[in-house]
């Protein structure tokens, strides 16, 4: 048996928008499961996202801290953003977010993994990349942050220290957790498991 998730969507008999939001909507679909009958499912219809583990020459991860209202926490995260720009590939989104949120460019990019964040309630998937050979964004090209990103702290933290904080429960952001654990696994395998970006 090949251990791989199968893409095999079932027929949607009807679809309605139950709630239209600022970033994503909640939709209601009636789905035909064949012999199992039909089911009605409400879920968040999400545009998807891209995230980046930016690793410097000292094996430090670039983290940014952002307030996340649904959980009421200031969370340390890796740079990430929605793939909501028409025609923009996930890699381009990750590159843009690294520049905008962490003021960094990277010369070397690999795809770490893709994750479905909460497949029982959201269509969101996140493409997670590894960026290395970092360099600062020139002052003339810096992104002017505003809104929730205004004054967003940035830190360079050793990869193993971040992994320990994830495993001890100190850091709970899902994207950060899976990305850092995948980065540690890739490093421990000599980076042989990395896919081209």
Image (spheres, rainbow, N blue to C red):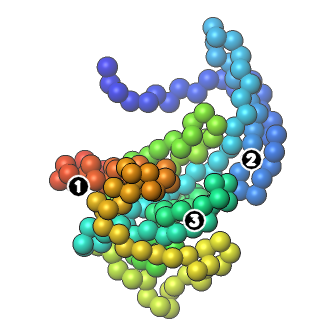
Q: Nearer the viewer, residue 123 or 70?
A: 70
Alpha-carbon span between mark 1 and mark 2: 38 Å
In this rendering, which labeled residue sits more in front, label 3 or label 1? 3
Question: What is the distance, in whole Å, between disc 3 and disc 1 at their CAs?
Answer: 28 Å
Looking at this view, is 127 or 60 the one in front?
60
The residue at 43%/61% (across/down) is: 52
Query: Answer yes or no: do the residues labelled 1 and 2 have beta carbons within 8 Å?
Result: no
**Residue underneath mark 1:** 187
Which label belongs to residue 74?
Answer: 3
| On screen, residue 11 above or below 187 | above
x and y percent of residue 80 in the render?
Answer: 51, 62
Given contact means CB atoms under 8 Å apart, are the residues at marks 2 and 3 in contact? no
Give the position of the N terminus as an image quadrant.
Answer: top left
Q: How far apart are marks 2 and 3 (CA)?
A: 25 Å
Mark in front: 2 vs 3: 3
For numbered disc 2, what is the local secondary structure?
strand
Which type of secondary structure does the marked residue at label 1 adopt?
Answer: helix
**Residue 132 visible in the shown view:** no
Residue lying furthest left: 190
* Mark 3 or mark 1, earlier in chain: 3
Residue pictured at 76% horizontal, 58% vertical? 22
Q: Is residue 43 visible?
A: yes
Find disc 2 in the rendering and name its residue: 25
Q: Toward which corner of the image does residue 45 lie, by quadrant?
A: top right
Residue 141 lies, in percent from the top left, at 50, 86
Image check: 18 left or right of 49? right
Labels 2 and 3: the sequence-earlier one: 2
Q: Looking at the figure, which quarter contains the C terminus?
A: bottom left
Residue 130, disc:
none
């Amino acid at each position: 048996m090949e251990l791989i998730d199968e893409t095999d969507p079932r027929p949607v008999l009807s679809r309605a928008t139950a709630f239209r939001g600022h970033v994503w909507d909640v939709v209601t679909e009636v789905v035909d499961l064949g012999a199992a009958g039909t089911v009605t499912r409400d879920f968040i219809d999400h545009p998807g996202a891209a995230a980046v583990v930016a690793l410097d020459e000292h094996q430090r991860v670039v983290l940014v801290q952002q307030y996340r209202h649904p959980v009421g926490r200031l969370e340390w995260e890796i740079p990430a953003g929605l793939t909501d720009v028409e025609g923009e590939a996930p890699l381009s989104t990750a590159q843009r977010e690294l520049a905008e949120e962490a003021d960094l460019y990277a010369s070397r990019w690999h795809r770490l993994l893709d994750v479905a964040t909460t497949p029982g309630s959201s269509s969101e998937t996140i493409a997670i990349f590894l960026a290395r050979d970092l360099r600062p964004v020139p002052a003339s090209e810096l992104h002017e942050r505003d809104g929730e990103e205004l004054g967003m702290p940035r830190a360079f933290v050793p990869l193993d220290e971040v992994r320990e904080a994830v495993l001890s429960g100190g850091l709970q952001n899902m994207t950060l957790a899976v990305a850092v654990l995948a980065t540690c696994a890739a490093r421990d395998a000599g980076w042989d498991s990395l896919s081209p970006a």
